[in-house]
Amino acid sequence: MKDKIIRGIAKNGDVRFFAAITTNLVEKASKTHGCSPVASAALGRMLTAASMMGVMLKDDKDKITLQINGGGDIGGIAAIGDSKGIVKGYVLNPNVDIPLNAAGKLDVGGAVGIDGNLTVIKDMGLKEPYIGQVPIVSGEIAEDITYYFAASEQVPSAVSLGVLVDRDMSILAAGGFIIQMMPEADDFTRDILTYRLDEIPSVTEAINKDGGMNTILDELFDGMDFQILSEYEPDFICGCSKKKVEEMLLSLGKKELQDIAESEETTEVVCHFCNKRYNFTREEIYELLKNA
């Protein structure tokens, strides 16, 4: 089953929605970072959210960054998405291992913690990026993003994110949805959707059982004439290269490059997003110094 994101509207445009299946990209991210089950669930939720929020952007070059750090054992998570749903991300402590929560499920909220903030950064080609920040509500990520939309963007939203991890630590299902009420939406529509959101199956249950999001969308928007406007193929792709790492090293300035060249025979730079390693000899660092 391919990953996909669908964007659509319902009730004559009074409601817009984004629904995502991200099983493969979360599997790729989990293996790249060697994640424990709870780290896979937390990183997967962040990547799924960044992918859906990315396709909300208007320009091909726009990017969105989500960061959360609540002081928990996981240490913090970052995810970056673009307007096509392509994402990359990492978790500071991919080996975090904590007991299941009271419901017998992976305790993402406990791993993330609530002593901190969720930060959303939108780089839309302007002189300064847009930065929104809200306190963490639960650390479960979906609830925190729901609060972000309400508090920072003043858009009533329902956010659901899920990652189902198998016993062998592979990803059985991952995905989510974002439903947003437009200013024209009436109270009756809001009430109906609120009721139906409590009745639908979980995202991972629907994906794992039916292979898609059709069951959820049919139940949520029954009688609301929902339309799918576009589809995207999300993926986990870092996009780093030695050239980009050279640009990063150049940004350090001459003094620091000089110190690196004098103290190290070989300098290794590891990409946070994909764990790829780049090695620079002393001669290569000196060559960079000429261009610094």
Image (spheres, rainbow, N blue to C red):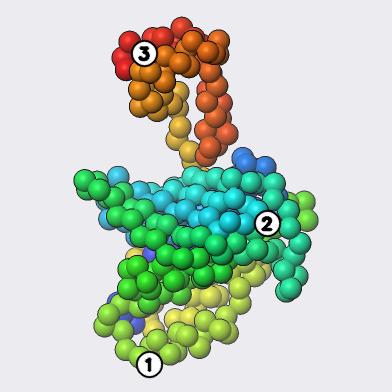
Residue located beneath label 2 in the image: 38
| 3 or 1: mark nearer the eye | 3
**Can I make out residue 115 in this image?**
yes
Say which element carries label 1: helix
The percent coordinates of residue 140 (x first, y second) are 57, 66
Which secondary structure, mark 3?
helix
Figure quadrant of residue 103: bottom right
Which amino acid does the dot numbered 3 rest on? Leu
Residue 187 in the image: above or below residue 82? below
Say what amino acid the circle numbered 2 marks. Val
Question: Where is residue 282 shown, x and y percent of the image?
Answer: 49, 9
Q: Which mark is residue 188?
A: 1
Cβ–Cβ under 8 Å for marks 2 and 3: no
Image quadrant for the N terminus?
bottom right
Q: Position of residue 126 (x, y in %)?
A: 22, 48
Residue ID at (45%, 35%): 239
Quarter of the image for the C terminus: give it.
Answer: top left
Q: Is residue 15 visible?
A: no
For the point 35% across and 27% down, which residue is it? 251
Q: Secondary structure at mark 2?
A: helix
- Residue in front for this viewpoint, 21 or 176: 176
* Mark 1 crowd level (few <14, some 14–19, many ≥20, 10 Å Cα): few
The reply to whether dot 3 and dot 1 touch (C-beta < 8 Å) is no
Q: Is residue 151 left or right of residue 76?
A: left
Mark 3 highlights which residue? 289
Identity of the residue drawn at 42% across and 57% down: 119
Residue at the image position 54 percent from the left and 29 percent from the top = 270
Q: Is residue 119 above or below residue 8?
A: above
Q: Residues within 10 Å of mark 3 (few under 14, many from 20)?
A: some
Image depth: mark 2 or mark 3 in front: 3
